[in-house]
Structure formats: C-alpha cells, structure tokens
Image (tube, rainbow, N blue to C red):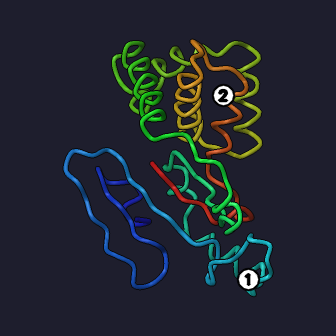
Amino acid sequence: MVLMRRPQPGCWLGPGSSGGPPATRSRGARWCSSRMNPCPCGHAGEGDGRCRCQPVVVERYAGRISGPLRDRIDLWVHMPRVEPGDYVTAAAPEGTATVAARILEARLTGLERGGRPNARMSGRALRSACALGPIEQAHAVRLAELEGWSARGIERLLRVARTCADLAGSPRVEQPHLDEAARFRSPSGRRVGFEAVS
C-alpha cells in the first residue's frame, strides 16, 4: 500500500498483524479499507494497563504509515475496545435499514446538486457545493494550518464536510460540519488505533 501511494479500485487490506489475509479486489468498486493495531501488542490506549509498549515504540509503530499515504485516506475511525458490560446492557443501536435510508437520501441529494457523488467532486465544483461563508472559510483555513494539511487534505476535508451537511439536511457546509469532518482526518502519531476507509 505504501508503495502504491494510491488506493486501487475496490481493495481490502487485512489486519496489520502477521498472518492476515491477502488483499483482495472487487471489480467496479471505488473504495479501499484498511485497519491497523495501535501498537505491536494491540492494547495501547485502552487504559487497562495491558499494554507494555514504550511510548517510542507506539509512535514508531504508527509512523509506519507515511504522511503522503495518510493524506490520501478520507476517513480515520477510532475503534475502541467495547467493554463487556456495555455490550451486554447497551440499548439496541439504530437499525441498518434506517441508517441505509438516511445515507441513500444524502447521496441522492449530492447527485442532484452536482451530478456526481461528493467523493468525486474537486476544485471549484467542490467549493461551490460547500457554499462556505466567510466564517466557515476562516475556520477551514485554521483547521488546515493547525494540522498542516496539504491541498489534497483540505479537499478531502471539504468532501467529508459536504457529506456531513447532506446527512444533516443542511444546504450549505457550516462550522459544525467542518469540525465533524476534521475529526475523521488522519490522526497524529499520538492517536493510534484507527481504522481507515477511503
């Protein structure tokens, strides 16, 4: 993956641990999914004392993913360990059919607006679709400067923010949508244990 620098259409990468399944591809798909452990032992950040890795080891482990590759990944999702008690006693989550209907509605909104999915928009068309006001523009710039994003990283932020706005039923991208999208951008070396989806 690091050598390719660019996700191939429809590939799935197995877990970072040795012995994982090989990458597979599906014809016509336009996504790539990968996952990694937070450290060599897999327990960093859980707070239960099971991780014995030194901080420098955790940082080195996370640093195996190069900056240019991180920049090409749309969503970094932290998947913390679910406590047994929470799993057993938690209320039933929202149904898949309900979530799927909301996603389909947001996707159709994007298609009606720009003739293509948000993930395929770029440049002027993307900025026009976001319809950022002066306050939102300044906020996007602050986020980009704070995290040191490239132009590619900013475009990915705007695409995700546009999708967040569509899911919320908002005609334009507002500050909360930018903040939500920023939480999905590439984590720093101190925040590891993320599943990446592009």
Measured as percent of width and height from the top left, residue 33 is found at 42, 56
Q: Nearer the viewer, residue 158 or 23?
A: 23
| Residue beneath the point at 75% across and 87% down | 52
Q: In the rendered image of this protein, does residue 165 appear above or below residue 128?
A: below
Q: In the rendered image of this protein, does residue 49 appear above or below residue 112?
A: below
Neighbor class of circle 1 (other Cα within 10 Å; few <14, some 14-19, many 20+) is some
Residue reaching furthest bottom? 52
Measured as percent of width and height from the top left, residue 176 is found at 72, 27
| Residue beneath the point at 48% across and 75% down | 16
Kind of element beneath mark 1 = loop
Q: In the rendered image of this protein, does residue 60 appear above or below residue 121?
A: below
Neighbor class of circle 2 (other Cα within 10 Å; few <14, some 14-19, many 20+) is many
Give the distance between the C-alpha atoms of the residues marked 1 and 2, in whole angstroms. 35 Å
Measured as percent of width and height from the top left, residue 112 is found at 37, 13
Mark closer to the chain start, 1 or 2:
1
Label tally? 2
The tag on residue 51 is 1
Mark 1–mark 2 contact, CB under 8 Å? no
Horizontal arrangement in the rendering, residue 99 relative to residue 145 (left or right): left
Q: Amino acid at mark 1?
A: Cys
Q: Amino acid at mark 2?
A: His
| Residue beneath the point at 47% across and 24% down | 123
Measured as percent of width and height from the top left, residue 158 is found at 57, 30
Quadrant in the rendering for residue 133: top right
Kind of element beneath mark 2 = helix
Q: Which residue is mark 2?
A: 177
Quadrant in the rendering for residue 132: top right
